[in-house]
Each structure stands twice: as C-alpha cells, then as structure tokens.
Amino acid sequence: MAAGGGAEDGSSAFCFSPAEREDGPGPVRSSYLAACRACGVRPASCLLPGPRGPALLLRHRGLGTRGAKALALSLMANTSVVSLDLADNWLLGEGAAAIAEMLKENGYISAVDLSDNRMGTEGAKAFSAMLLENTTVVALQLSGNEFDDQAAKYLADAITANSKVEILDLSYNKFGDKAGEVLGVAIAENIGLKELKMGWNHFHSEGAVALAKGVGANVFLKVLDVSYNGFGNSGAAALGEALRANNVLEELNVSNNRISVEGALRLADGLKENKTLRILQMMRNPMQNEGCCGILKALRANSGTGMEVLDLPDVPVSKELAELREAVKALLPNLLLRHGGNTKQQRKSLSAVEPWPQPKALAHARASFPMDDGS
C-alpha cells in the first residue's frame, strides 16, 4: 500500500463486488466509471452506484492523485452534490489541482473539506486560482496542508478578491511571519469572511501584529481562532488595538500564545471599549494573577460589554482575583467565567455556543461534515 492508504499505483484501494458491477442508476455512475477508465484507476466501491445525496463523504479513503482526478472528472457537470469531504486522502498538489479545476466548472458544491492532504504550494496556487473564479463555495477547510510563507502569497490573493467564502480553515499549517504580513493585508481588504481559523501555525512578532491589524480593519469577520501560535505581548497589544476599533468580531481564541502579564493588560485596554465580543478564550497563557485581574477590570469598567463566555488560564486565585470575579459576575450574571477550562461553574457548554455558526444556506452542507472519520 502507498502512503495515505492508496494502492501503490496511486489508484483507489476499494474494489467493487460483482453485484456492484451491475448497472447503477443513471449518468452519475456512468460518468464516474468512464473517468476511472480514463485515469487508469479502479473505481471506489463507496461511489457505486453513485452519490445518493447532497453530501459526498470520502475522508480517509486513500484516493491518491489519480483517484482525485477521476473523481474530479465525474463531478464536473454534477448538480446533486453540494458538500464534498476529501480530508486525508493523500491528494498532494496535483490531486488538489484537479479538484480545483473541477470547482471552476461546478456551480453547485458549496462546502469543501480538503484537510490533511499535503497540498503544499502547488495546491495553494491551484485553489487560489479557483477562488478567483468560483462563486458558489462558501465553506472551505484547508487545515493541515503544509502551506508555508510561499503558499500564503497565493492564498492572500484569493482572500483579497473572493467575497463568497464565509468560512475558512487554515489551521495546522506552516505559516510564519511573512505569511502573517501578506495575509493580514488580505484580511483587511476581504469583504466576505465571517469565520477564520488560523490556529497551530507559526505567527510571531511582526506576523502576529500584521494579522491583528488586518482584523482591526475588517468589518465582516465574526469569529477568529489564532490559538497555538506565538503572538506574545506585541501580538496581544495589536489585538487590543484591533478590539478597540472593531465593532463586529464576536469570538476570539488566543489560547496558548505566550501572552504574559504585559500582553494581557494591553489586550484588556481594547476590552474596555469593545461592545461586540461575546466569547474570549485565553487559556494556557502565562498571564498570572495580574493579567487575569486586568482582563476582569476591563470588563468591570465597560458598561456596554457583550461578553458571555470568558476562559482564563488556570492560575492560583488570589484575594484580588476572587473579589474581581465576584464583582464581574454581579455585573454580568449570565457570564460564563472559567479558569483553565474548568466546567464546574458552566451554565451552558461551549458546544452549545457553536464555534462555527452556520449560514442558512450552509445548514445542510455543514450537517454533512461529521466529526468522525466519515466512513
């Protein structure tokens, strides 16, 4: 078997039984079989007799590059599939490019998950070109694809120009400070994104500051996850400035970003004036008691705060912190305040506060992306 679960020749490892060889319903099956013959791959049994609903779930199937090409050919003119999940299929850049070319022609697929496919710069370039033409994809998950600073240049072009994608996941990649600079400019100019995940990358200092400035200038983004980066105090200070100016952002996750007391206090300066942020996650940052107190003091001083959920690091609770906590809870009785992820005082789970709220047009497509392996 080849890496990623595919056969050594790059074809799908899923053969079909004699019963499955009988004629299936209509042109969908015929189109897929013809594409497989053209690409020299064995058809995947899970696709026979063809897609039976609006969601095509094929994660962890080991399709490989040629399997992706066959699938792309069969979906060019398909009008029934609206969500496509190809996560973890070892598509590489070449396979991702085939899917991107298909999405230029297909005007029905609105949700795409190509996470963990090692797309690299080639895949980023192909998807950037696709997003300059496609007007139907509104949810795009590209986490874990080894995108680096070079790939970011292509993706930045797409983010700047595309106004249709509302949900974008670029987490678990290899973006550095140069990527942060170009992506920050793109975010500032984007007029479509509502939810952006960029956690588990390598944004530090200049890159983090550039991203934060982009968020401050954006008037559409509602959810931002930059957890598990290296924003540090300079990045936290820039986020504080962004929160001071931004009146749209509702959810912010800056957990595990090396934010110390100084950075927490600078971010708190922005919270004193912000009216829209509802959820703030700051777990696993070395903020100490003083930093936590600074955040609570900012909320206490802001009579118009909309804060509903606040996650702070797990620190020993001093007398001042305990008193501030009680004072803030008296002012904001519905606030869910937690330390280090402690859920004992929880009034409702964070799963109830859905981290990726779905647009009405995506309700069916979002329901199609399961949390398990999709098999």
Image (spheres, helix red, strand yellow):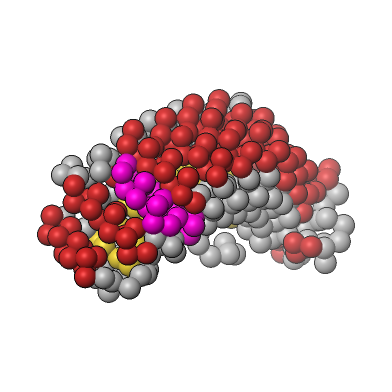
Residue 224 vertical placement versus 161 (above, below) = below
Q: Quadrant of the rendered structure where residue 98 is?
A: top right
Screen quadrant of the C terminus: bottom right
How many labels, in total?
0
Quadrant including the N terminus: bottom right
Q: Which residue is found at the position 77% from the left and 58% from the top?
A: 12
Is residue 266 in the magenta section?
yes
Q: Left or right of 24: which side holds 326?
A: left
Of residues 333 and 144, the one drawn nearer to the viewer in this rendering? 333
**How far across and down, in percent of the image, does residue 292 sit?**
31, 60
What residue sits 26% from the left and 70% below the top? 318
- The answer to whether one can see residue 159 in this image is yes
Looking at the picture, tell me which residue is in the foreground, 94 or 175. 175
186, 181: nearer the viewer: 181
Residue occupying the point 71% across, 47% down: 119
Q: Is residue 326 above or below residue 246?
A: below
In the depicted structure, whether residue 22 falls above or below residue 129:
below
- Residue 146 in picture, x, y percent from top left: 69, 50
- The residue at the point 61 percent across, 29 percent down is 157
Farthest-out residue, left: 330
Is residue 47 among what the camera can see? Answer: no
Q: Picture coordinates of residue 304 (x, y %)?
A: 18, 42
Q: Which residues are magenta?
A: 250-270
> How far from the left and from the top, in percent, is residue 136?
53, 33
Q: Is residue 130 magenta?
A: no
